[in-house]
Image (tube, helix red, strand yellow):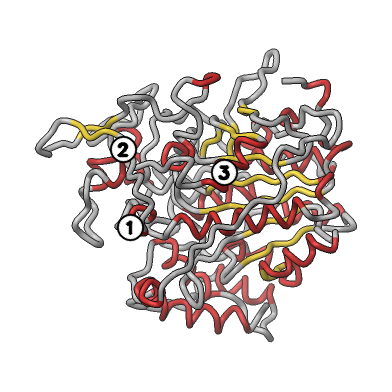
Amino acid sequence: MGAAMAGLQSKIRNIVVLMLENRSFDSILGRLYPPGERGFDGIPDGASNPWTGGPGDRVAAWNDDTLVRGSMTVPSPDPGEYFADITTQIFGLGGADTQVPPPMSGFIDNYVRQTKEPPYDPKAIMHYYTAAQLPVLSAIAKAYAVCDQWHASAPNQTWPNRFFTHCATAGGYVNNSPPHFPYMMTTIFDRISWAGLANGWRVYFHDMPQALTLAHLWRHRDCFSLFDDFLDDAAKGLLPCYSFIEPRYFADLQMPNDQHPPHDVVYAEQLIAKVYNALRQSPNWNTTLLVITYDEHGGCFDHAPPPAAVPPGDHRPHEAFAFDRYGVRVPAVLVSPYIRPGTILRPPPAAGVPLYPYDHTSIIATLRKCFNLGGPLTARDAAAPDLDAVLELDGPTNFELGTIAVPDYQPTQQDLQNAIGRPLTEMQQGLHALAAVLPGPGDDIEAHIAQLAAGVLTALPVPPTAGEAFDFIKQKLAAII
């Protein structure tokens, strides 16, 4: 890539990140381009996984191209997401976690052994979507850049990977559950606040921001706004230096648009189109870099083995994992008028420096470089490639794609009722637990954090349905934001 032409500091004033949920690269973008075209690392022809004890030896990757509602919610039920599940998915049933490269052979065997909502169809975990089924993300990826070497920061579920996005570490915790409130890691949001940047940062959310898992951010509740405020700020040219957008995780008057299995993927297509259009029409457009990515793969099949990673340096001895390897690949699309159309982004080699893939800490490395935010938060973001190299054009001259049509796709009343009445996903359970420990409107934040650290924790049973959990979350969140 034209490194000499790049220049985050001279080109970018607004970085926007939209982080969706629990999809692998192969499941969402694996057929963006035909296999092998321009070296694109999508789903290879003949990709498959073994099914131990099944009627056949292997199950191949496949697609249902009927474009009916049921085909847009695969896989269902929700796959396994715990560290142990992902270890099996990567190394195979009974495989040693020392294999280099890992065989990526345990997706089916792990899926069919889940017990929460049987039965588990072995084919479901090998399903992928086509560009015709995801026209919004696919069109944006082709008009700007797709990264086929972006891995989740760790082979863990949602919270550890979102922690890496915000803190360049998971604090040493391998799972969402059991929760370990308060999480006190320093965040990139703290860095921006300490730097005193005029436009600062903002988290825009739909229903419950997962960023509130980080207790440092409880001191900055005025930096949390609803998604409609993002649309308004973009229209007025008032976007902050850093915007982080969270999707809708629960069904209420509208369906979840996070793409977390088994949520319908088209609702996220609508969200992506709204975010892109808001930026494309914004006075901030010529100075904006948008990153669309996913926190983790959510158990969905991907063929690319995760490489070794630099540990962040805060491993907890009682945990079984030192955070020394990446998680499974996730979709990543980069958008800016400085990006050459049709870019396939890979880490640029640098003399004498090990070549690491992009991961969520690349966002932190990019923010630090763009806004002069100082040295790395941890050893992980110190090693992460930043996104400077994707900005190949000398000027903001990529006019390949104007505004994009928002898919006209509405839920039926039965769809909504089914989603409200479902058992909670693992991620939704975590959000319910988070809401239970948030400070109240009159609480002293520091005293509240100290109580949590001392073990004063409100333990609540998990409600039977997502709707009941969200009713509780709305009450708790309305009291503080």
Query: Which residue is depicted at the point 26% across and 33% down?
Result: 60
Q: Is residue 104 left or right of residue 162?
A: left
Nearest to the observer: residue 80 or residue 444: 80
Label 3's element?
loop
| Sequence order check, earlier mark of 1 and 3 | 1
Mark 2, residue position: 62
Q: Residue at x 69, y 62 (%)?
A: 203
Q: Is residue 373 above or below residue 422?
A: above
Question: Which disc, if any, is residue 55?
Answer: none
- Give the Cα separation between the discs numbered 3 and 2: 40 Å
Q: Residue furthest top?
A: 351
Residue 57 seen anywhere in this rendered image of the structure? yes
Residue 314 marker? 3
In this image, 17 relative to 111: left or right? right
- At label 1, the amino acid type is Gly
Residue 40 at what x, y percent from top left? 52, 24
- The image quadrant where one finds the N terminus is top right
Which amino acid, mark 3?
A: Asp
Q: Which picture quadrant has residue 206?
A: bottom right
Q: Looking at the rendering, which quadrant does residue 273 occupy?
A: bottom right
Of 447 and 345, which appears nearest the observer?
A: 345
Q: Position of residue 106 (x, y in %)?
A: 28, 36
Whether residue 313 is visible to the viewer of this picture, yes or no, is no
Q: Indicate the position of residue 290 as horizontal and vertical percent values.
A: 70, 46
